[in-house]
Image: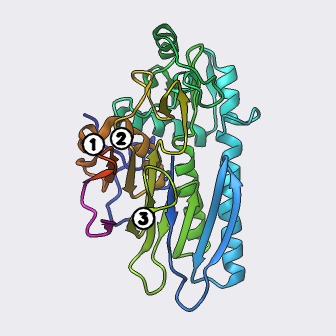
Amino acid sequence: MAPFRINGAASGSARPPCTGAPARTALVLLTCITFASCSQEEPYFQETFVMGTAASVTICGLDEEQAREAAASALHELHRIESIMSSWKEDSELSRLNRLSRGNRFRVSAELFVLVDSALHFSMVTSGAFDITAGPVIRLWGFHGGDVRLPTENEIDEALSRVGYRRVTLDAGDSSITLEPGMELDLGGIAKGYAVDRAVSLLREKGATSALVNLGGNIYALGTPPGKDGWSVGIRDPHGGAAITGTILLRDEAVATSGNYENFVVIGEKRYGHIVDPRTGRPVDRVLSVTVVAPTALATDALSTGLFVLGPDGGRDIVDRPGCIRALYALPGNGAARYKAIGDFEGRLSLTE
């Protein structure tokens, strides 16, 4: 099996150490932040709405003018990436690729090329459990603009005929991507993580050493708040609601959570979650949620979906590889969730009784 590239870089660069800075290209997502104030000074906080969700930057240790400039730069970067990689914006580069490829080579920017290559790498790592071509089967169940109804076997088979990461052709020579007719790419499961890592990179350039970036639950914790061992991030009850069932202490790493407890449809008397296995075309119901910690938000974004589909047994094969990955599964129990942690959380995971 191919080695696991934590940064997903197209160049095949070496995996960064666990203690190193995040790679350049590096929680649904229902973690909530429970950080304390930054020493005696209040943290600087700025937010926006982008990529269909709320985004915020919290900075400690810079004066107000420096923090405002750094936060504005980071948030602007999120909007810039959305303009390139959104599948909802008709004028985005990704939308043009989906419209115009149709079996033809379509030349894209180096940035989009590398991210698609990274996504295909994570598809390989997860044996197709994470797949940016899965849009047809996701819509079939009433998500992403589809009609809410129970699809037939023939409809599932037809949708699956237009799904498959191995059928996406990349040519690094001219940065071109070729999609087979009827196929499309949706980067919703990885672009937010990439955007968070880019925002963190800009914060570092502006001198920030203690900050938190949160894009719809895709979170990166830069450094630590003054006088603290890390940023405390709360994990919400996998059954929904506002209750916190545990916390994870983070420093220079990212966290993401995938779950079905808010985004679902009801067909007949059965509830179907929005996370669909791209290999079978059917929603996954064996897991309530999975929280993934890794050195980059890119990795946590993609792997949280892939590990959700694989379940704890399949997920262990990925977590056990070198790469500083940890996962916390919430599984159905008798009236309450039961938790299964995979990987060494180093005493930084705390679950309520």
Pointer 1 residue: 312
Pointer 3 residue: 21
Q: Is residue 344 magenta?
A: yes
**Distance of mark 2 from mark 1, alpha carbons?**
9 Å
- Closer to the eye: label 2 or 3: 2
- Report the side of 244 relative to 313 (left or right): right
- Closer to the eye: label 2 or 1: 2
Q: Which mark is residue 244?
A: none
Looking at the rendered structure, the secondary structure element under dot 2 is loop
Q: Which amino acid is tagged 1?
A: Pro
Q: Earlier in the sequence, mark 3 or mark 1?
A: 3
Q: Which residues are magenta?
A: 340-353
The vertical placement of 266 against 290, above or below, is above
Q: Decide: marks 2, 1 in contact (CB < 8 A)?
A: yes
Residue 132, image x, y percentages: 51, 31
Residue 218, image x, y percentages: 52, 55
Q: Earlier in the sequence, mark 2 or mark 3?
A: 3
- Crowding near pointer 1: few (<14 within 10 Å), some, many (20+)? many
The residue depicted at 52 percent of the width and 60 percent of the height is 242
The vertical placement of 119 against 194, above or below, is above
Residue 293, image x, y percentages: 38, 57
The residue depicted at 45 percent of the width and 66 percent of the height is 233
Residue 52, image x, y percentages: 67, 46
Image quarter (top left, top right, bottom left or bottom right) of the N terminus = top left
- Report the side of 144 relative to 160 (left or right): right
Query: Residue 124's image quarter?
Result: top left
**Distance of mark 2 from mark 3, alpha carbons?**
31 Å
The vertical placement of 92 against 247, above or below, is above
Observer able to see residue 127: yes
Pointer 2 residue: 287
